[in-house]
Image: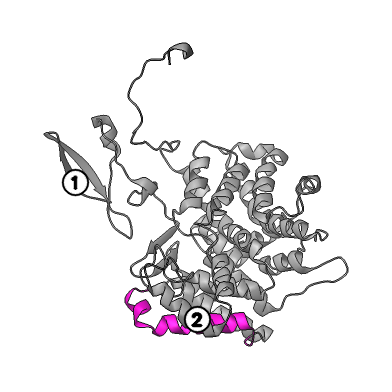
Amino acid sequence: MTTPNATLQIDGQTIELPTLKGALGPAVIDTRALGNQGYFTYDPGFLSTASCSSSITYIDGDAGLLYYRGYPIEQLAERSDFLETAYLLWNGELPNAGQKQEFDALVSHHSMLHDQMLSLFKGFRRDAHPMAVMVSILGAMAAFYPESSDVADPRQREISMFRLLAKVPTVAAWSYKYNKGEPFIYPRNDQGYAANFLHMLHATPCESYEPSPVLARALDRIFILHADHEQNASTSTVRMAGSSYANPFACIAAGTACLWGPLHGGANESVLAMLAQIGDAARIGEFVNRAKDKTSGFRLMGFGHRIYKNMDPRAAIMRQTCYEVLDELGLHDDPLFKMALKLEQIALEDDYFIKKKLYPNVDFYSGIVLRALGIPTSMFTAIFALARTAGWIAQWNEMIVSPGHKIARPRQLYTGPQRREFAPVNER
Protein backbone atom coordinates (compact mmCIF):
# COMPACT_ATOMS: atom_id res chain seq x y z
CA MET A 1 0.00 0.00 0.00
CA THR A 2 1.42 3.40 -0.98
CA THR A 3 0.77 6.76 0.64
CA PRO A 4 1.68 10.29 -0.59
CA ASN A 5 5.33 10.81 -1.43
CA ALA A 6 7.81 12.41 0.94
CA THR A 7 9.85 15.28 -0.48
CA LEU A 8 13.53 15.81 0.30
CA GLN A 9 15.12 19.12 -0.64
CA ILE A 10 18.91 19.24 -0.62
CA ASP A 11 21.40 21.48 -2.48
CA GLY A 12 18.57 23.01 -4.46
CA GLN A 13 17.44 19.59 -5.62
CA THR A 14 14.02 18.10 -4.90
CA ILE A 15 13.83 14.32 -4.54
CA GLU A 16 10.50 12.53 -4.34
CA LEU A 17 10.53 9.45 -2.10
CA PRO A 18 7.55 7.08 -1.94
CA THR A 19 6.12 6.30 1.48
CA LEU A 20 4.88 2.78 2.07
CA LYS A 21 2.26 1.63 4.56
CA GLY A 22 2.18 -1.88 5.94
CA ALA A 23 -0.75 -3.79 7.43
CA LEU A 24 0.13 -2.40 10.88
CA GLY A 25 2.62 0.07 12.27
CA PRO A 26 4.08 3.36 11.05
CA ALA A 27 4.63 4.21 7.40
CA VAL A 28 8.17 3.96 6.02
CA ILE A 29 9.96 6.20 3.55
CA ASP A 30 11.39 4.24 0.62
CA THR A 31 14.91 5.68 0.28
CA ARG A 32 16.19 3.26 -2.34
CA ALA A 33 16.27 5.97 -5.00
CA LEU A 34 18.68 8.13 -3.00
CA GLY A 35 21.71 6.14 -4.13
CA ASN A 36 21.08 7.14 -7.74
CA GLN A 37 21.07 10.78 -6.61
CA GLY A 38 24.40 10.50 -4.81
CA TYR A 39 23.11 10.22 -1.24
CA PHE A 40 22.80 7.52 1.42
CA THR A 41 20.97 7.60 4.72
CA TYR A 42 22.91 7.39 7.99
CA ASP A 43 21.29 5.27 10.70
CA PRO A 44 23.73 3.49 13.06
CA GLY A 45 22.17 0.36 14.46
CA PHE A 46 19.37 0.66 11.87
CA LEU A 47 17.10 2.03 14.61
CA SER A 48 14.94 3.96 12.13
CA THR A 49 15.40 1.75 9.08
CA ALA A 50 13.17 -1.06 7.86
CA SER A 51 15.69 -3.55 6.48
CA CYS A 52 13.05 -5.77 4.90
CA SER A 53 9.34 -6.35 4.54
CA SER A 54 7.97 -9.27 6.55
CA SER A 55 4.59 -10.80 7.34
CA ILE A 56 5.77 -12.92 10.28
CA THR A 57 5.90 -10.88 13.49
CA TYR A 58 4.54 -7.48 14.53
CA ILE A 59 5.51 -5.48 17.61
CA ASP A 60 3.95 -2.27 18.91
CA GLY A 61 6.17 -1.28 21.81
CA ASP A 62 4.03 1.65 22.92
CA ALA A 63 0.85 -0.42 23.08
CA GLY A 64 2.62 -3.53 24.40
CA LEU A 65 1.58 -5.78 21.51
CA LEU A 66 3.32 -8.83 20.06
CA TYR A 67 1.65 -10.74 17.22
CA TYR A 68 2.82 -13.89 15.44
CA ARG A 69 1.14 -13.88 12.01
CA GLY A 70 -1.60 -11.69 13.51
CA TYR A 71 -2.22 -13.85 16.58
CA PRO A 72 -1.61 -12.14 19.97
CA ILE A 73 1.18 -13.80 21.92
CA GLU A 74 -1.13 -14.14 24.93
CA GLN A 75 -3.50 -16.43 23.00
CA LEU A 76 -0.71 -18.59 21.60
CA ALA A 77 1.02 -18.98 24.97
CA GLU A 78 -2.25 -19.94 26.65
CA ARG A 79 -3.84 -22.17 24.00
CA SER A 80 -1.11 -23.35 21.62
CA ASP A 81 2.13 -25.29 21.97
CA PHE A 82 5.58 -24.55 20.63
CA LEU A 83 5.53 -26.82 17.58
CA GLU A 84 2.11 -25.50 16.56
CA THR A 85 3.51 -21.99 16.95
CA ALA A 86 6.52 -22.93 14.81
CA TYR A 87 4.14 -24.24 12.13
CA LEU A 88 2.31 -20.91 12.25
CA LEU A 89 5.53 -18.90 11.90
CA TRP A 90 6.65 -21.00 8.95
CA ASN A 91 3.37 -21.33 7.07
CA GLY A 92 1.33 -18.27 8.01
CA GLU A 93 -1.67 -20.26 9.27
CA LEU A 94 -2.39 -22.55 12.19
CA PRO A 95 -2.43 -26.25 11.25
CA ASN A 96 -5.51 -28.43 11.26
CA ALA A 97 -5.38 -31.66 13.28
CA GLY A 98 -3.85 -33.72 10.49
CA GLN A 99 -1.25 -31.11 9.60
CA LYS A 100 -0.24 -30.73 13.23
CA GLN A 101 0.16 -34.47 13.70
CA GLU A 102 2.33 -34.73 10.60
CA PHE A 103 4.43 -31.70 11.58
CA ASP A 104 5.02 -32.97 15.11
CA ALA A 105 5.98 -36.42 13.80
CA LEU A 106 8.48 -35.01 11.30
CA VAL A 107 10.18 -32.95 14.01
CA SER A 108 10.39 -35.85 16.46
CA HIS A 109 11.85 -38.20 13.82
CA HIS A 110 14.64 -35.77 12.87
CA SER A 111 15.86 -35.19 16.43
CA MET A 112 18.89 -37.54 16.43
CA LEU A 113 22.33 -36.26 15.49
CA HIS A 114 24.62 -38.00 13.02
CA ASP A 115 26.69 -40.49 15.00
CA GLN A 116 29.98 -39.01 13.75
CA MET A 117 29.08 -35.74 15.44
CA LEU A 118 30.00 -37.38 18.75
CA SER A 119 33.64 -36.90 17.82
CA LEU A 120 33.05 -33.18 17.28
CA PHE A 121 31.77 -32.73 20.82
CA LYS A 122 34.77 -34.61 22.18
CA GLY A 123 37.10 -32.12 20.51
CA PHE A 124 36.08 -29.35 22.93
CA ARG A 125 37.43 -28.67 26.38
CA ARG A 126 35.07 -29.90 29.07
CA ASP A 127 34.67 -26.39 30.45
CA ALA A 128 33.70 -24.92 27.05
CA HIS A 129 30.65 -22.67 27.25
CA PRO A 130 27.55 -24.42 25.85
CA MET A 131 26.98 -21.55 23.41
CA ALA A 132 30.50 -21.92 21.99
CA VAL A 133 29.79 -25.59 21.39
CA MET A 134 26.36 -24.89 19.88
CA VAL A 135 27.72 -22.34 17.40
CA SER A 136 30.37 -24.80 16.24
CA ILE A 137 28.12 -27.86 16.01
CA LEU A 138 25.38 -26.01 14.14
CA GLY A 139 27.88 -24.70 11.62
CA ALA A 140 29.41 -28.17 11.24
CA MET A 141 26.03 -29.62 10.24
CA ALA A 142 26.55 -28.06 6.81
CA ALA A 143 29.32 -30.64 6.29
CA PHE A 144 26.99 -33.50 7.23
CA TYR A 145 24.16 -32.31 4.98
CA PRO A 146 25.92 -30.79 1.92
CA GLU A 147 22.74 -30.98 -0.15
CA SER A 148 21.26 -28.29 2.11
CA SER A 149 23.39 -25.69 0.32
CA ASP A 150 20.97 -25.81 -2.61
CA VAL A 151 18.70 -23.16 -1.07
CA ALA A 152 16.95 -22.61 -4.41
CA ASP A 153 15.39 -26.08 -4.07
CA PRO A 154 12.19 -25.83 -1.98
CA ARG A 155 12.48 -29.47 -0.95
CA GLN A 156 16.01 -29.02 0.39
CA ARG A 157 14.96 -25.89 2.26
CA GLU A 158 12.08 -27.76 3.88
CA ILE A 159 14.29 -30.68 4.95
CA SER A 160 16.85 -28.26 6.42
CA MET A 161 14.12 -26.41 8.31
CA PHE A 162 12.89 -29.61 9.94
CA ARG A 163 16.42 -30.80 10.70
CA LEU A 164 17.25 -27.54 12.43
CA LEU A 165 14.10 -27.33 14.52
CA ALA A 166 14.42 -30.97 15.54
CA LYS A 167 18.15 -31.15 16.22
CA VAL A 168 18.81 -27.88 18.04
CA PRO A 169 17.37 -29.23 21.35
CA THR A 170 19.69 -32.24 21.05
CA VAL A 171 22.67 -30.00 20.31
CA ALA A 172 21.81 -27.76 23.28
CA ALA A 173 21.29 -30.65 25.69
CA TRP A 174 24.46 -32.43 24.60
CA SER A 175 26.46 -29.19 24.92
CA TYR A 176 25.36 -29.09 28.54
CA LYS A 177 26.02 -32.79 29.15
CA TYR A 178 29.52 -32.50 27.73
CA ASN A 179 30.24 -29.46 29.90
CA LYS A 180 29.01 -31.37 32.94
CA GLY A 181 30.95 -34.54 32.13
CA GLU A 182 27.87 -36.74 31.84
CA PRO A 183 26.99 -39.22 29.05
CA PHE A 184 24.83 -37.96 26.21
CA ILE A 185 21.15 -38.86 26.45
CA TYR A 186 19.41 -39.61 23.16
CA PRO A 187 16.06 -38.04 22.28
CA ARG A 188 12.81 -39.94 22.68
CA ASN A 189 10.16 -39.83 19.98
CA ASP A 190 7.37 -40.51 22.48
CA GLN A 191 7.99 -37.24 24.31
CA GLY A 192 6.78 -33.75 23.49
CA TYR A 193 9.27 -31.13 22.35
CA ALA A 194 9.86 -29.47 25.74
CA ALA A 195 9.58 -32.68 27.76
CA ASN A 196 12.09 -34.37 25.47
CA PHE A 197 14.57 -31.55 25.98
CA LEU A 198 14.23 -31.77 29.77
CA HIS A 199 14.71 -35.54 29.49
CA MET A 200 17.94 -35.13 27.51
CA LEU A 201 19.12 -32.48 29.95
CA HIS A 202 18.44 -34.23 33.26
CA ALA A 203 18.32 -38.00 32.66
CA THR A 204 21.35 -40.26 33.01
CA PRO A 205 21.90 -43.87 31.87
CA CYS A 206 21.27 -44.98 35.44
CA GLU A 207 18.32 -42.73 36.25
CA SER A 208 15.44 -41.66 34.02
CA TYR A 209 13.80 -38.27 34.19
CA GLU A 210 10.11 -37.70 33.58
CA PRO A 211 9.15 -34.04 33.88
CA SER A 212 5.73 -33.26 35.25
CA PRO A 213 3.24 -31.79 32.75
CA VAL A 214 3.39 -28.47 34.63
CA LEU A 215 7.15 -28.18 34.19
CA ALA A 216 7.11 -29.31 30.56
CA ARG A 217 4.34 -26.84 29.82
CA ALA A 218 6.28 -24.04 31.52
CA LEU A 219 9.32 -24.64 29.32
CA ASP A 220 7.12 -24.98 26.22
CA ARG A 221 5.64 -21.58 27.06
CA ILE A 222 9.11 -20.06 27.35
CA PHE A 223 9.84 -21.42 23.88
CA ILE A 224 6.66 -19.83 22.49
CA LEU A 225 7.38 -16.44 24.06
CA HIS A 226 10.89 -16.36 22.59
CA ALA A 227 10.16 -17.94 19.20
CA ASP A 228 10.40 -14.68 17.25
CA HIS A 229 10.76 -10.97 17.94
CA GLU A 230 10.85 -9.15 14.63
CA GLN A 231 14.15 -7.81 13.19
CA ASN A 232 16.38 -7.95 16.26
CA ALA A 233 20.17 -8.29 16.03
CA SER A 234 20.30 -12.08 15.74
CA THR A 235 17.40 -12.31 13.29
CA SER A 236 18.97 -9.60 11.15
CA THR A 237 22.23 -11.57 11.29
CA VAL A 238 20.47 -14.68 10.00
CA ARG A 239 18.90 -12.67 7.19
CA MET A 240 22.17 -10.97 6.27
CA ALA A 241 24.09 -14.26 6.19
CA GLY A 242 21.28 -15.91 4.26
CA SER A 243 21.09 -13.09 1.74
CA SER A 244 24.22 -14.52 0.07
CA TYR A 245 22.47 -17.92 -0.18
CA ALA A 246 24.78 -19.29 2.49
CA ASN A 247 24.07 -22.75 3.86
CA PRO A 248 21.08 -22.58 6.27
CA PHE A 249 23.00 -24.32 9.07
CA ALA A 250 25.70 -21.66 8.78
CA CYS A 251 23.05 -18.94 8.89
CA ILE A 252 21.52 -20.29 12.11
CA ALA A 253 25.00 -20.67 13.59
CA ALA A 254 25.60 -16.99 12.78
CA GLY A 255 22.36 -16.01 14.50
CA THR A 256 23.32 -18.10 17.52
CA ALA A 257 26.70 -16.37 17.72
CA CYS A 258 25.02 -12.97 17.65
CA LEU A 259 22.53 -14.00 20.32
CA TRP A 260 25.42 -15.05 22.56
CA GLY A 261 26.40 -11.39 23.02
CA PRO A 262 25.52 -10.12 26.53
CA LEU A 263 23.65 -7.13 25.10
CA HIS A 264 21.22 -9.50 23.36
CA GLY A 265 20.69 -12.93 24.86
CA GLY A 266 21.98 -12.71 28.41
CA ALA A 267 19.28 -10.63 30.11
CA ASN A 268 17.66 -13.39 32.19
CA GLU A 269 21.09 -14.56 33.32
CA SER A 270 21.80 -10.98 34.44
CA VAL A 271 18.64 -11.02 36.56
CA LEU A 272 19.87 -13.95 38.62
CA ALA A 273 23.32 -12.39 38.91
CA MET A 274 21.67 -9.23 40.25
CA LEU A 275 19.63 -11.19 42.79
CA ALA A 276 22.78 -12.94 43.91
CA GLN A 277 24.47 -9.56 44.29
CA ILE A 278 21.61 -8.25 46.45
CA GLY A 279 21.97 -11.40 48.52
CA ASP A 280 19.23 -10.79 51.08
CA ALA A 281 15.67 -9.48 50.94
CA ALA A 282 16.53 -7.01 53.68
CA ARG A 283 18.90 -5.23 51.26
CA ILE A 284 16.36 -4.73 48.46
CA GLY A 285 15.51 -1.19 49.58
CA GLU A 286 19.20 -0.27 49.42
CA PHE A 287 19.52 -1.51 45.84
CA VAL A 288 16.25 0.12 44.77
CA ASN A 289 17.58 3.45 46.03
CA ARG A 290 20.82 2.87 44.15
CA ALA A 291 18.83 2.21 40.97
CA LYS A 292 17.06 5.56 41.41
CA ASP A 293 20.39 7.37 41.81
CA LYS A 294 21.67 8.21 38.33
CA THR A 295 25.20 8.64 39.65
CA SER A 296 25.42 5.16 41.17
CA GLY A 297 25.94 3.30 37.90
CA PHE A 298 23.69 0.52 39.16
CA ARG A 299 20.56 -0.60 37.36
CA LEU A 300 17.98 -3.22 38.20
CA MET A 301 18.07 -5.97 35.60
CA GLY A 302 14.79 -7.35 34.24
CA PHE A 303 12.86 -4.07 34.38
CA GLY A 304 11.81 -2.05 31.37
CA HIS A 305 12.48 -3.00 27.76
CA ARG A 306 14.15 -1.34 24.79
CA ILE A 307 11.11 -1.95 22.58
CA TYR A 308 8.17 -2.14 24.98
CA LYS A 309 7.46 1.25 26.55
CA ASN A 310 4.61 -0.19 28.58
CA MET A 311 4.23 -3.72 29.98
CA ASP A 312 6.05 -6.42 28.04
CA PRO A 313 3.11 -8.57 26.82
CA ARG A 314 5.17 -11.69 27.50
CA ALA A 315 5.83 -10.73 31.12
CA ALA A 316 2.32 -11.35 32.46
CA ILE A 317 2.31 -14.82 30.89
CA MET A 318 5.72 -15.60 32.33
CA ARG A 319 4.70 -14.27 35.73
CA GLN A 320 1.77 -16.70 35.88
CA THR A 321 4.02 -19.51 34.68
CA CYS A 322 6.52 -18.64 37.40
CA TYR A 323 3.90 -19.08 40.11
CA GLU A 324 2.70 -22.35 38.58
CA VAL A 325 6.23 -23.75 38.64
CA LEU A 326 6.90 -22.57 42.19
CA ASP A 327 3.66 -24.19 43.33
CA GLU A 328 4.50 -27.44 41.55
CA LEU A 329 7.96 -27.63 43.10
CA GLY A 330 7.11 -26.14 46.48
CA LEU A 331 9.79 -23.47 46.13
CA HIS A 332 7.99 -20.45 47.56
CA ASP A 333 10.33 -20.57 50.57
CA ASP A 334 13.48 -20.49 48.46
CA PRO A 335 15.36 -17.30 49.53
CA LEU A 336 16.18 -16.26 45.95
CA PHE A 337 12.59 -16.62 44.81
CA LYS A 338 11.26 -14.74 47.85
CA MET A 339 13.72 -11.94 47.15
CA ALA A 340 12.64 -11.77 43.51
CA LEU A 341 8.95 -11.60 44.42
CA LYS A 342 9.59 -8.82 46.94
CA LEU A 343 11.54 -6.85 44.35
CA GLU A 344 8.71 -7.36 41.88
CA GLN A 345 6.19 -6.02 44.40
CA ILE A 346 8.24 -2.90 45.11
CA ALA A 347 8.73 -2.19 41.41
CA LEU A 348 5.00 -2.53 40.68
CA GLU A 349 4.03 -0.20 43.53
CA ASP A 350 6.85 2.38 43.62
CA ASP A 351 5.99 5.71 41.95
CA TYR A 352 9.49 5.99 40.46
CA PHE A 353 9.13 2.74 38.53
CA ILE A 354 5.52 3.42 37.60
CA LYS A 355 6.26 6.89 36.17
CA LYS A 356 9.21 5.59 34.17
CA LYS A 357 7.22 2.51 33.12
CA LEU A 358 9.93 0.20 34.42
CA TYR A 359 7.74 -2.87 34.66
CA PRO A 360 9.18 -6.35 35.14
CA ASN A 361 9.86 -7.83 31.70
CA VAL A 362 9.87 -11.40 30.43
CA ASP A 363 13.53 -11.89 31.39
CA PHE A 364 12.82 -11.11 35.05
CA TYR A 365 10.51 -14.11 35.31
CA SER A 366 12.04 -16.51 32.79
CA GLY A 367 15.35 -16.69 34.64
CA ILE A 368 13.52 -17.65 37.83
CA VAL A 369 11.54 -20.34 36.00
CA LEU A 370 14.61 -21.79 34.30
CA ARG A 371 16.45 -21.96 37.62
CA ALA A 372 13.48 -23.76 39.15
CA LEU A 373 13.58 -26.25 36.27
CA GLY A 374 17.14 -27.14 37.25
CA ILE A 375 18.69 -25.37 34.27
CA PRO A 376 21.99 -23.61 35.10
CA THR A 377 22.58 -20.00 34.07
CA SER A 378 25.22 -21.08 31.54
CA MET A 379 22.37 -22.68 29.57
CA PHE A 380 19.97 -19.73 29.60
CA THR A 381 21.15 -18.26 26.29
CA ALA A 382 21.19 -21.75 24.77
CA ILE A 383 17.50 -22.06 25.70
CA PHE A 384 16.91 -18.70 24.05
CA ALA A 385 18.68 -19.88 20.87
CA LEU A 386 16.69 -23.12 20.89
CA ALA A 387 13.40 -21.22 20.97
CA ARG A 388 14.44 -18.50 18.53
CA THR A 389 15.50 -21.09 15.93
CA ALA A 390 11.84 -21.43 14.95
CA GLY A 391 11.64 -17.73 14.12
CA TRP A 392 15.07 -17.57 12.51
CA ILE A 393 14.09 -20.36 10.14
CA ALA A 394 10.83 -18.64 9.24
CA GLN A 395 12.61 -15.33 8.61
CA TRP A 396 15.35 -17.01 6.56
CA ASN A 397 12.87 -18.86 4.36
CA GLU A 398 10.72 -15.76 3.87
CA MET A 399 13.79 -13.83 2.72
CA ILE A 400 14.94 -16.56 0.31
CA VAL A 401 11.58 -16.74 -1.50
CA SER A 402 10.85 -12.99 -1.51
CA PRO A 403 10.56 -11.44 -5.00
CA GLY A 404 13.45 -9.22 -5.98
CA HIS A 405 15.78 -10.77 -3.41
CA LYS A 406 19.12 -8.96 -3.08
CA ILE A 407 22.29 -9.69 -1.14
CA ALA A 408 22.59 -7.38 1.86
CA ARG A 409 25.02 -4.50 1.30
CA PRO A 410 24.83 -1.72 3.91
CA ARG A 411 26.54 1.58 3.09
CA GLN A 412 28.78 3.65 5.35
CA LEU A 413 29.78 7.19 6.23
CA TYR A 414 33.52 7.17 5.55
CA THR A 415 35.56 9.20 8.07
CA GLY A 416 39.10 8.02 7.26
CA PRO A 417 41.94 9.82 5.43
CA GLN A 418 41.50 11.17 1.95
CA ARG A 419 43.86 10.06 -0.83
CA ARG A 420 47.48 9.72 0.24
CA GLU A 421 50.59 8.81 -1.75
CA PHE A 422 52.68 5.81 -0.76
CA ALA A 423 56.28 6.51 0.29
CA PRO A 424 59.09 3.91 0.49
CA VAL A 425 59.99 2.86 4.00
CA ASN A 426 63.29 4.78 4.02
CA GLU A 427 61.44 8.02 3.25
CA ARG A 428 58.85 7.80 6.04
Residue lying farthest to the right in this orientation:
206
Quarter where residue 322 is shown: bottom right
Furthest residue toward left: 12
Q: Which residue shows up at 50% across the image and 46% down it?
A: 237
Colour style of the rendered protein structure: one colour
Residue at 32 percent of width and 77 percent of height: 355
The C terminus - image quarter: top left
Magenta stretch encompasses residue 415: no
The residue that mark 2 highlights is 284
Is residue 335 on the magenta stretch?
yes
Observer able to see residue 129 = yes
**Amino acid at circle 2:** Ile
> Which element carries disc 1, helix, strand or loop?
strand
Describe the element under mark 2 as helix, strand or loop: helix
Label disc, if present, on residue 61 of the rendered structure: none
Q: Which residue is drawn at 51% across and 36% down?
A: 244
What type is the residue that disc 1 sits on?
Ala
Against 165, residue 284 (above or below) is below
Q: Residues within 10 Å of mark 1 (few under 14, many from 20)?
A: some
Which residue matches tag 1? 6
- For marks 2 and 1, give the one nearer the viewer: 2
Main secondary structure found in the magenta portion: helix
Bounds of the magenta segment:
332-357
| Disc 2 residue crowd, few under 14, some 14–19, many 20+, Cα 10 Å | some
